């Protein structure tokens, strides 16, 4: 199982200029932010499944362009897995014929290029030996983390979140967990906006993960442009964990 980071920034214009989008092997996307724009048309046509953590624009806008770009170039639909609430939000506010057409009925009803599949919390989808499980997290909208593994090893991608103690108590004993890709959007001095927007800052992140094994490898995502170095310094200065800033272009094998 191969993971490619196409984008993982908390905005545009920073050191890492693409928003959240991970490519698993060649056929599964996790979130569809602006990192998706790096793929060629042939690579876009290979994507069979998209898993969405939540409905915020920086994680989903590429989906709208993806289905349009591959229309007529593949014979099977792209299946988009998300919570019932996320699917409802995207249908109401994005694929509503005003912002973008409803691609679940294009080119024709019953034969849409976009196929929705509800993934309830804590359920797992298996796709050719790759297991993807949704875990609820605390964010301003309905959100999930994904635990992705091949039965031997894997990674946890938190999506956007603030304090979610249940997630960490669950994964503190998961021996197959190789990497944690974790949101830390703000600096400690921005704790008020971090709490209001339900993202971590270093202080709230470290309080949440304190019981994780000390060998856990954390890769930090969603750093706000211009604040990358300060956020990373605050994380490293206050804990014994290994923290690395995630950047687009990195690849991981499992
Ligand atoms: Zn968000
Ligand atoms: Zn986000």
Image: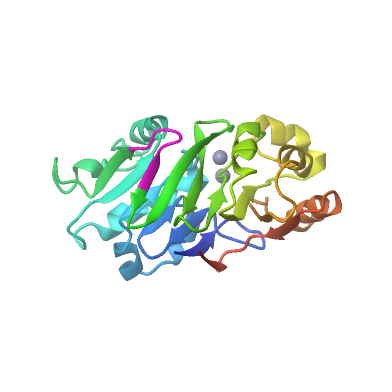
Check the image and report above or below for 59 versus 93.
below
Q: Is residue 225 left or right of residue 38?
A: right
Q: Is residue 205 magenta?
A: no
Q: Is residue 245 left or right of residue 49?
A: right
Q: Could you tell whether 62 is left or right of 17 in the image?
A: left
At horizontal 65% and vertical 35% (from top left) the residue drawn is 162
* Residue closest to the eye, 93 or 7: 7
Given residues 98 and 64, the one toward you in this image is: 64
Horizontal and vertical percent position of residue 28: 38, 57
The image position of residue 167, as x and y in percent, is 60, 37
**Which residues, given as a range, are shown in magenta?**
118-125
Q: Is residue 106 above or below residue 4?
A: above
Between 249 and 72, the residue placed more toward the observer is 249
Tell me the colour scheme of the image.
rainbow
Find residue 120 and report its horizontal and vertical position in percent. Answer: 39, 33
- The quadrant in which the N terminus is found is bottom left
Instruction: Spot the residue most to the right.
Output: 237
Residue 140 is drawn in which quadrant? top right
Q: Position of residue 6 (x, y in %)?
A: 50, 62
Residue at 45% over, 55% down: 151
Q: Is residue 10 visible?
A: no
Vertical relation: 17 (above or below) 157: below
Q: Residue at x 70, y 45 (%)?
A: 212
Number of dots carrying numbers:
0
């Amino acid at each position: 199982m191969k993971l490619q980071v196409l984008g993982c920034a908390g905005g545009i214009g920073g050191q890492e200029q693409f928003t959240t989008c991970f490519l698993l092997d060649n056929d599964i996307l996790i979130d569809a932010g602006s990192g998706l724009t790096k793929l060629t048309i042939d690579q876009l046509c290979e994507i069979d499944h998209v898993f969405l953590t939540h409905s915020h624009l920086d994680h989903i806008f590429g989906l709208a362009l993806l289905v349009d770009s591959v229309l007529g170039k593949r014979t099977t639909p792209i299946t988009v897995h998300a919570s019932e609430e996320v699917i409802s939000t995207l249908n109401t506010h994005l694929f509503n014929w005003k912002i973008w057409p409803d691609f679940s009925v294009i080119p024709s009803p019953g034969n849409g290029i976009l196929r929705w599949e509800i993934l309830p919390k804590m359920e797992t989808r298996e796709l050719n030996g790759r297991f993807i499980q949704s875990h609820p997290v605390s964010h301003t909208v309905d959100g999930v983390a994904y635990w992705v593994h091949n039965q031997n090893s894997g990674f946890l991608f938190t999506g956007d979140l603030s304090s979610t103690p249940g997630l960490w108590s669950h994964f503190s004993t998961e021996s197959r967990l190789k990497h944690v890709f974790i949101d830390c959007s703000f600096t400690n001095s921005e704790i008020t906006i971090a709490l209001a927007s339900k993202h971590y800052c270093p202080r709230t992140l470290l309080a949440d993960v304190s019981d994780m094994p000390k060998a856990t490898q954390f890769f930090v995502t969603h750093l706000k442009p211009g604040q990358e170095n300060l956020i990373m310094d605050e994380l490293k200065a206050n804990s014994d964990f290994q923290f690395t800033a995630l950047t687009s272009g990195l690849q991981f094998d499992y």
